[in-house]
Image: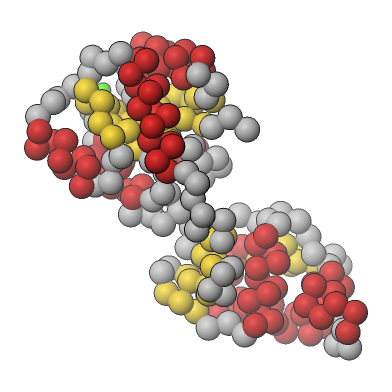
């Protein structure tokens, strides 16, 4: 699938100009005229790169950058800042907050497209990303270290609880019957009864606290994770 670039910029003309040029270079583009409208859609689909204007009507571009970089889920999305101010100190500030590149207005759209490609090249491939699964914004599952963190705190799960959570999180929205979960845990050697799963899920929920709300019990069917 083509990479998705989000552009947050309050001047529609600039959004249009950048969009046309990025689309020509086979990118998908979504434009947002305020930080708020962008942040609202972020949960649904994450862009592969963000072009962020420094001066926005509702929020400072720096604040948006800082907010994204402070959340594990979004921290790895590269950001190119657009600014009309060229002062060196601001460049430094932007880079300290984790922006990956800087483009000063007025800019040539071709130059911006070239920068987008360069930043994306630098960012891929991300070998350690595929092993991180998330549920909502606070639960992270590290499938290599076999660790689960909630609110940045590691929680102690039994191997069975871990396997169940990992299974559900690997296919969000899909309902797993108790039978299917047992099969996944013990293959053909299952000697335990269906209700065992309910006990594991109960413990798992206790350990996840408030975040356990993502684990849904579908009556008569089984369990699933729904965000
Ligand atoms: Ca602006």
* 216 or 104, nearer to the observer: 104
Q: Quadrant of residue 194?
A: bottom right
The reply to whether residue 226 is visible in this rendering is: yes
Q: Residue at x 61, y 62 (%)?
A: 214
The quarter of the displayed image where residue 37 is located: top left
Residue visible at 54% across and 32% down in the picture: 3
The N terminus sits in image quarter: top right
Does residue 33 show up?
Answer: no
Find residue 123 and report its horizontal and vertical position in percent. Answer: 42, 43
Q: Residue at x 43, y 37 (%)?
A: 121
Q: Say if 72 sits above or below 14 in the image.
A: below
Q: Is residue 31 above or below residue 163?
A: above
Q: Position of residue 85 (x, y in %)?
A: 14, 25
**Who is closer to the viewer here, 223 or 27?**
27
Residue drawn at the location 20% of the way across and 47% of the way down: 96
Ligand 1 occupies quarter: top left
Image x and y of residue 73, in percent = 45, 53
Q: Is residue 40 above or below residue 190?
A: above
**In the rendered view, does 207 fall on the left or right side of 91?**
right
* Front position in the image: 88 or 12: 88
Picture coordinates of residue 18 (x, y %)?
40, 17
């Amino acid at each position: 699938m083509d990479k998705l670039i989000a552009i947050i910029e309050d001047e529609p003309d600039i959004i249009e100009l950048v969009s046309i040029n990025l689309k020509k270079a086979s990118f998908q583009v979504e434009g947002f005229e305020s930080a708020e409208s962008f942040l609202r859609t972020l949960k649904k689909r994450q862009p592969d790169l963000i072009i962020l204007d420094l001066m926005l009507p509702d929020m400072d571009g720096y604040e948006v950058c800082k907010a994204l970089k402070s959340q594990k889920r979004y921290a790895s999305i590269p950001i190119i800042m657009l600014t009309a101010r060229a002062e060196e100190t601001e460049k430094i500030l932007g880079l300290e907050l984790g922006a990956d590149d800087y483009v000063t207005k007025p800019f040539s759209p071709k130059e911006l497209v070239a920068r987008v490609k360069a930043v994306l090249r630098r960012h891929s491939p991300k070998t350690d990303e595929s092993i991180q699964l998330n549920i909502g914004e606070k639960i992270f599952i590290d499938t290599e270290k076999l660790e689960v963190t909630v609110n940045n705190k590691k929680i102690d799960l039994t191997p069975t609880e871990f396997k169940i959570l990992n299974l559900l999180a690997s296919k969000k929205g899909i309902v797993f019957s108790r039978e299917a979960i047992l099969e996944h845990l013990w293959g053909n050697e299952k000697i335990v009864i269906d209700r065992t799963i309910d006990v594991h899920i109960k413990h798992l929920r206790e350990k996840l606290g408030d975040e356990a709300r993502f684990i849904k019990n579908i009556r008569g069917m089984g369990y699933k994770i729904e965000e």
